[in-house]
Amino acid sequence: MAEHDMIEPVIGVIGGSGLYNIDGLEDREWRKVETPWGDPSDELLFGRLDGVRCVFLPRHGRGHAIPPSDLNYRANIDALKRSGVTDIVAVSAVGSLRDDLPPGSFVLVDQFIDRSFARQKSFFTTGCVAHVPMADPTCPRIGDVIAREAGRLDFAMRKGGTYLVMEGPQFSTRAESELYRQWGCSVIGMTNMPEAKLAREAEMDYASIAMVTDFDCWHEDHDSVTVDAVIKVMKRNGERARALLTAVIPALGQARGACHAGCDRALEHALITPADKRDPELMAKLDAVAGRVLAR
Ligand SMILES: CSC[C@H]1O[C@H](OP(=O)(O)O)[C@H](O)[C@@H]1O
Ligand SMILES: Nc1ncnc2[nH]cnc12
């Protein structure tokens, strides 16, 4: 896309623990989307909110049956891209690593430390190598819109924070939790990587709203984190996230030019394998993710 072209954005929402649906969608329809990377977590929910096209995907599937390490992150991102999504708002439950982010806090994440290790992290495997920039892993344009709408709703949200991605599914040990605090991390979760990396490779703008459910295990006034405790806070967080999305989606959906941060052109200078050395089978699989740059 050239910088002066106008687009009608399509907003993708990836719902994490506690968010399996979104409110107020017109023309709603759950549809199966096939991808060359396998099956996404579930069918995708298509619809419109105030006329803005949006597509919702429950990250762990409806019924939350898929753990973080078994999620097919590539299929999830490809399915959204294939469905026309331009902007992704990811919503996730997290533990807090800071005293001033108690359960119930919302954080607009702007950095990640990726400690996950048992996942497929790239669309670009042997046969076509690409290295996209990740210095700023989230889209500041989407972040500004979320922060503005949160402000309008009088909704407290911390702008900026580092999300430590652990492999899981077990929660962290106290020593790990203390280490991540020393590293200056704000929150801990299990899913935003490789999701954010793959969104960047697929040239989709990605923002992450982290909803704090617990103090992980470092906090002296709190016991170890348990799923029961997490679920109690998660229900309330989920309701508030749905209210926020009802405002954010129509605001993000206004016609716009290219992203000033360049997220939608991340592959522009990323491919290193020359055209005549690329694997045709892999090229076919990359049709949705990299079609813009491979077509020329
Ligand atoms: C239910 S607590 C642990 C679980 O919740 C988070 O999931 P998501 O990021 O999809 O909201 C965390 O990453 C774990 O997968
Ligand atoms: N403490 C925690 N650690 C990892 N993922 C989480 N998701 C919610 N709380 C979490």
Image: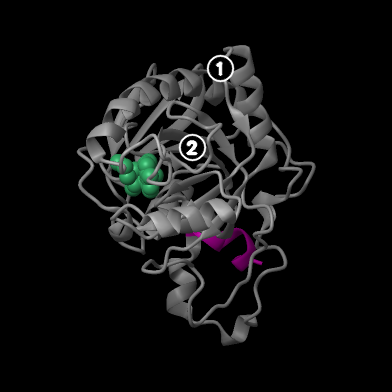
> Residue 273 placed where, x, y %?
62, 81
The stretch in magenta equals 288-296
Out of 60 and 167, give the one closest to the viewer.
167
Residue 253 visible: no
Ligand 1 lies in quarter: top left
Residue tagged 1? 155
Whether label 2 lies within 8 Å of ligand 1 gets the answer: no
Q: Residue at x 37, y 25 (%)?
A: 238
**292 drawn magenta:** yes
Callout 1 crowding tier (Cα within 10 Å): few <14, some 14–19, many ≥20? some
Sequence-first tag of 2 and 1: 1
On the rendered structure, is 242 left or right of 186? left
Q: Residue at x 78, y 46 (%)?
A: 3
Q: Residue at x 32, y 32 (%)?
A: 18
> Residue 218 placed where, x, y %?
42, 46
Out of 148 and 46, give the one closest to the viewer.
148
On the rendered structure, is 84 left or right of 23? right
Q: In terms of image quadrants, where is residue 135?
A: bottom right
**273 drawn magenta:** no
